[in-house]
Image (spheres, rainbow, N blue to C red):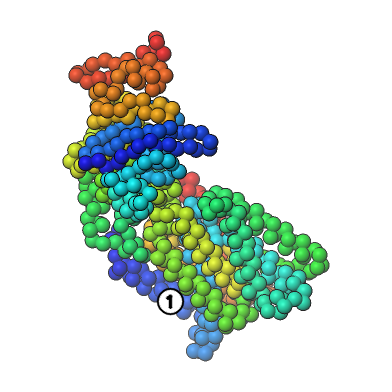
Amino acid sequence: MTLLQIDNLRVTLAAREVLAGVACALAAGEVVALIGANGCGKTTLLRAALGYVPYSGSVAWEGQPLAAIARKTLSQRVAYLPQAPTVEPGDTVLDVLRLGRSPFGSVFGIEREGDETIVQTVAADLGLLDLLPRPIESLSGGQRQRVLLGRCLVQTPRALLLDEPATFLDLRHQVDLHRLLARLARERGIGVLMASHDLNLAAAHSDRCVVMKAGRVLAQGPTDEVLTEAVLSEAFDVPIRSAQIDGERVFSVPSKIA
Amino acid sequence: MRRFDLTTLLLLLGASALVWAIAAGLCTLVGSTGTIGWPSYEIAKLRLNEHVLIASLVGAALSAAGVAYQAILRNPLADPYLLGASGGATLAAYAWRLGAFGGSILAAAVSPQLAAMIGATAAVAIVLAAAGPRGRLDPVRAILVGVVVNSVCGALFLLLNALFRDQPGSGGALTYLSGDIQTTASHAQVLISSLIVLTGWIVLLAMTPLLNVVRLSEDEALSLGVRVQRARWTGLITASIMTAAAVAVSGPIGFVGLICPHVARWFVGNDNRRLLPVATSLGAIGLAVADAIARGLLRSDSVGTLIPVGVITALVGGPFVLVILSRMKR
């Protein structure tokens, strides 16, 4: 089932055309990686898909035009994690997770019993139960990112839009995060659209890739078909080579060539 | 921490009110000349009406407004005067006293309290208009413009002081610079201020879940279903009107709106749903106690006149801000 359908999306910011006719889609249960150099429009594409920037063209969620969906309704279907999410010192992990129920909130913020069940389930699922009373600033980068992802999951979304979620993580936590996202897509049918800089993680954990360059889609399709030396070299303006290690493709920029 | 259900909310409101009631009762033990002792019913009622309730009203309003300001401006050091309310109120009340409005109909119709309220509202309106071009309110810009408007009001205050050759001493210009629990405000004026503060407080209480979200970045708040701009405007206007109503009664009493929300955080954490009732109670208690201390100091031979309560809150509040800052560093 198609969750997000984008056609001929154009965004102009400060007199610069940031997106110049982008078309792509996200289906339930798949992980789609947005790949491209800095400034190619990945973040703008995610923000435009949520209506955070003025755009022209067509953006539809589950067949419904974005403009016709109320902000609250959209937040009950789609969760978004920006590249540098706010970490408010003094907020406990439980405080942060509970914010995820905001789209379903009532006046005075009275919580229903089901709200707490969802928070506890997500905390258990992400291994956060022991951390619930801890202030978020006392956590490691990997734990913090899990908490913020947890806040998104507490929204019980059908789609997750993530802007370079692994940026501040070490290798181990990057792998853990990507495995977790793949599991969420597989087990819960959540559609995951994430901007990513790591070609190897994207190759290993995404079903499809959208490669962008200068506000346009350079190539898109199944990850194995799209992530080629030629496409990636053009996208990043640097020669990229691939090799097979233990049956998996890995990418690198040979130092002699670069 | 337990789920925030209706029982939690009611328990929190009840406990906050109870603690305030006990503190308010204790404050009636201090007389207006500094005598301390068990008062008769009539005397206790008088002290309650002339001091404790007014101080509690002002303290509660400033502290509740402080909670909203700190969340919306995304700044732990924000206080209700940051957007010009104190500067505007002081300038307008002082201008009224000096007869700067001349013999105009306006001057005749306006009391110093109303002048202060109009001044505070006008200053905040200027700040919000300048900080929110095309309806988009930017917290950093609002703080900057607020500082500018407060400074300009301060300069105009001094200019008036010089032009009118007003004595700076006690009873003159100085009285306007530090707030005080005035018993000159009429019963009707206090009642009107109370109604404004109560209405604003209920709006803020209903908004507390939104205040939790507007502390985040605009994109995150939007992704959680909150119309950030609407929440910012509603919250700031409500808190500013409450501040103006408080300043009209007492003048600019500093630090209560900055510190009480932080003390409340030590008890209940950052969640504004819990914070607002507790901070409101602490603000009411804090100012009532400061006022009782000011009265109590009259017993000392070295204190010849009632120290404005704003002086007490500033002397206690100043070091407290340093404590907050040192905690923030860690």
Query: Which quadrant does the C terminus of chain A fall into?
Result: top left
Secondary element at image label 1: helix
Q: Position of residue B277 (x, y in %)?
A: 41, 67
Query: Chain for mark 1?
Result: B
Q: Residue at x 77, y 61 (%)?
A: B159
Q: How many marks?
A: 1
Quarter assignment of residue B32: bottom right
| Horizontal relation, residue A257 to residue A32: left or right | right
Who is closer to the viewer here, B206 or B293?
B206
Quarter assignment of residue A106: bottom left
Q: Position of residue B292 (x, y in %)?
A: 55, 74
Q: Is residue A87 above or below residue B125?
A: above
Q: Is residue A40 above or below residue B257?
A: above
Q: Position of residue B42 (x, y in %)?
A: 52, 90
Q: Which residue is mark 1?
A: B22
Q: Is residue A11 above or below residue B92?
A: above
Residue A177 visible (yes or no): no
Q: Residue at x 71, y 69 (%)?
A: B94
Query: Which quadrant does the N terminus of chain A fall into?
Result: top left
Q: Amino acid at mark 1?
A: Ile
| Horizontal relation, residue B85 to residue A33: left or right | right
Quick one: label 1, few (<14), some, or many (20+) residues within 10 Å? few
Residue A10 visible (yes or no): yes
